[in-house]
Image (tube, rainbow, N blue to C red):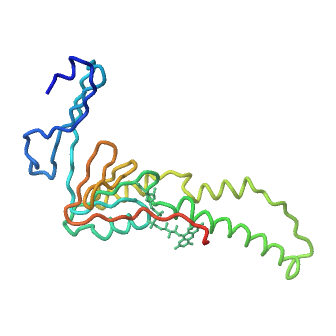
Amino acid sequence: MADPLDDGVALCGELTKPIPKSDGQGRAASTILCIAAFGVAVTEVLRVAEEFDVVCLGGGVAGEAIAVGLQGSGLTLAVVERELVGGECPYWGCVPSKTLLRSGETLTEAGRARVLAASRVDWNVDFPKISTRVRWMARNLDDSRPAAAMEATGAKLFRGEGTLTDSRTVMVGSQELVGRRALVIANGSTAAIPR
Ligand SMILES: Cc1cc2nc3c(=O)[nH]c(=O)nc-3n(C[C@H](O)[C@H](O)[C@H](O)COP(=O)(O)OP(=O)(O)OC[C@H]3O[C@@H](n4cnc5c(N)ncnc54)[C@H](O)[C@@H]3O)c2cc1C
């Protein structure tokens, strides 16, 4: 093959080096050799694959349940989360919505006091106050405690967008995670308008 550095042709391909597929610690490696256009820069990126018994895409309620369920089983688990550990429920779903509802209920009850027990009850709705409480109940979008709780189960947490590359493999950035026994897709759902 012509030397790509000679004529400035870009070459970017994957070369598998003759290094062991696994080093005995659940790690395998391959090397990507990328020669940039015009042959100026030669970058070598080491892509490391880590093997686990189970890889779970998504660290929401389901991901947390899997981590707790596998705790003490002897199976290794990797959880991939691109946003907040805990998922929708504590930050955007169950907890904030119920906190909002509770504020409404309280005002409704106060209104009933006028009928049942008081001659006069006055209030102004203070939305900033409600909103501050909602955010506080949603842990101010801080997932450090649930993340620590997840890792305390023995699961390894990977932060970032996970992409399925095959039925056993998830890529997170340049990190390759292989699920030896299972790959769990627990990436939640989005709302859709029925046709
Ligand atoms: C307004 C509202 C109120 C609700 N109230 C209640 C309630 O009162 N009680 C109740 O039981 N349920 C309630 N729910 C539903 C509840 O939030 C969901 O059932 C629950 O969050 C589902 O958990 P999950 O783990 O399947 O998904 P999610 O909680 O959505 O978690 C999925 C996770 O996967 C991550 N993820 C997705 N794609 C990728 C990727 N490619 N790479 C890495 N990470 C990724 C996301 O960041 C997310 O953290 C409510 C939902 C809403 C919207």
Left or right placement of residue 90 versus residue 99 in this view: left
The relative height of residue 132 versus residue 90 in the rendered view (above or below) is above
Left or right placement of residue 36 versus residue 89 in this view: left
Q: Residue at x 20, y 38 (%)?
A: 14
Rendered location of residue 15, percent (x, y):
16, 38
Left or right placement of residue 95 versus residue 144 in this view: right
Q: Quadrant of the C terminus?
A: bottom right
Indicate the quadrant where residue 74 lies: bottom left
Rendered location of residue 148, percent (x, y):
37, 54
Q: Residue at x 71, y 66 (%)?
A: 103
Rendered location of residue 173, percent (x, y):
34, 43
Nearest the eye: 114 or 28: 28
Indicate the quadrant where residue 55 lies: bottom left
Rendered location of residue 116, percent (x, y):
85, 82
The relative height of residue 109 versus residue 179 in the rendered view (above or below) is below
Left or right placement of residue 55 versus residue 106 in this view: left
Nearest the eye: 41 or 195: 195
Q: Residue at x 43, y 55 (%)?
A: 145
